[in-house]
Amino acid sequence: MSPGPAYRIEDLAHLSGATVRTIRAYQDRGLLPRPERSGRANLYSDAHLARLHQIAGLLDRGYTLASIKELLEAWDAGRGLGGVLGLVAEVDGPWSDEEAVRISRAELDERFGGSPDVAAVAEAMELGVLEPVPGDEDSFLVPSPQELAVAVELHAAGVPLSAISAHLRELRGQVEHIAARFLEFTTEHVFARYLDGPHRPTDAEAAEAATLVRRLKPLAQQTVDAELARAMRLLAVRHLRQHLGTDESPAQPSTARSVSLPEETMRAVEGLVGVERVAEFVALAAEREVHARALDALTSRGGPPSDLGEEG
């Protein structure tokens, strides 16, 4: 830190707009250098004040304290912040095209049947599906309108809100595992050269890494979308076959049986008639084969007289 006027911590807090407690917390986290000791007093300089302004500016731009520490360490190492800031901004930036929307409490209640549910709202806020709007208790911010729309549709279909919340918690844990594996994979095969060297990346390397992050961002979602669609088709057909083979109508007991078909056969049938008509196709094909064999059996027992239609 460069020399300059000496400030006590109270003076530094007043000039920077930070609280004394915040300044001490920054020191403990390594974001702010320790003050100079003069007798029994701790003295701060203009360099400390400038650093506090840097931190405040980065916080306003949405950086976390952990990211700010990385940036400031790069600054202290003598490198410009251009490339590093670009990389951190790319990683910290949105990973979806969705834009947050604002919704009133009355509109929220209406979308979920018209009756207020305080417990459900509290659960949604805990999960981050809803966020409070400072100074407005009658409105919420919705970070993911798509996620809220899914909850609305499930509730309209008869799923209790408590079950939707529990399912989201379970799903979130599984998706975070997938995200962690994707990050491990890309770090090992793509970003290791930027992160594992003896020195931190240069501005040019950081800018190159930021470009790669921007290119790779949609790949995770595209891969999950494709695999989810594949798994849903496979499991939904299997689930449907199981239920078709066991369901019975009270008025007319069903004699259906569950029959396992080779996977290649299932895929061929799906390609011909679509997933939703597989069961109908198999039933009709079996019925046609049964009728054909019955006709064959009848004709094999003896055909018409040989002189049928001949004149005597």
Image (cartoon, rainbow, N blue to C red):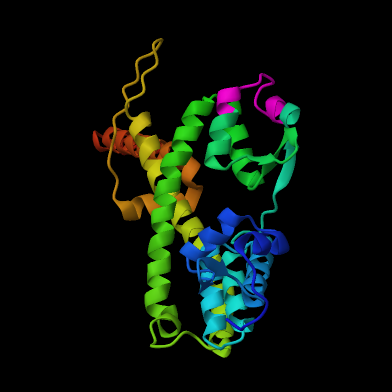
Q: Residue at x 71, y 25 (%)?
A: 110
- Of residues 144 and 284, the one drawn nearer to the viewer in this rendering: 144
- Of residues 238 and 292, the one drawn nearer to the viewer in this rendering: 238
Quick check: 55 above or below 136?
below
Q: Position of residue 8 (x, y in %)?
A: 62, 65
Q: Which residues are magenta?
A: 108-120
Q: Residue at x 56, y 76 (%)?
A: 72
Task: Name the quadrant containing residue 242.
Answer: top left
Which quadrant does the N terminus fall into?
bottom right
Of all residues, the one furthest to the left in this rendering is 301
Q: Residue at x 74, y 42 (%)?
A: 102
Of all residues, the one furthest to the top in this rendering is 251
Quick check: 277 above or below 119?
below
Q: Position of residue 262 (x, y in %)?
A: 29, 50
Regarding residue 124, the answer to whether it shows in the image is yes
Residue 218 shown left or right of residue 190 in the figure: right
Residue 100 shown left or right of residue 32 in the figure: right
Quick check: 66 above or below 45?
above
How many numbered badges does the structure rendering display?
Answer: 0
Quick check: 245 above or below 276?
above
Task: Name the quadrant containing residue 89.
Answer: bottom right
* Magenta-span inclusion, residue 113: yes
Which quadrant does the C terminus fall into?
top left
Q: Position of residue 295 (x, y in %)?
A: 33, 35
Q: Position of residue 67 (x, y in %)?
A: 54, 68
Of all residues, the one furthest to the front in this rendering is 39
Residue 156 shown left or right of residue 288 in the figure: right
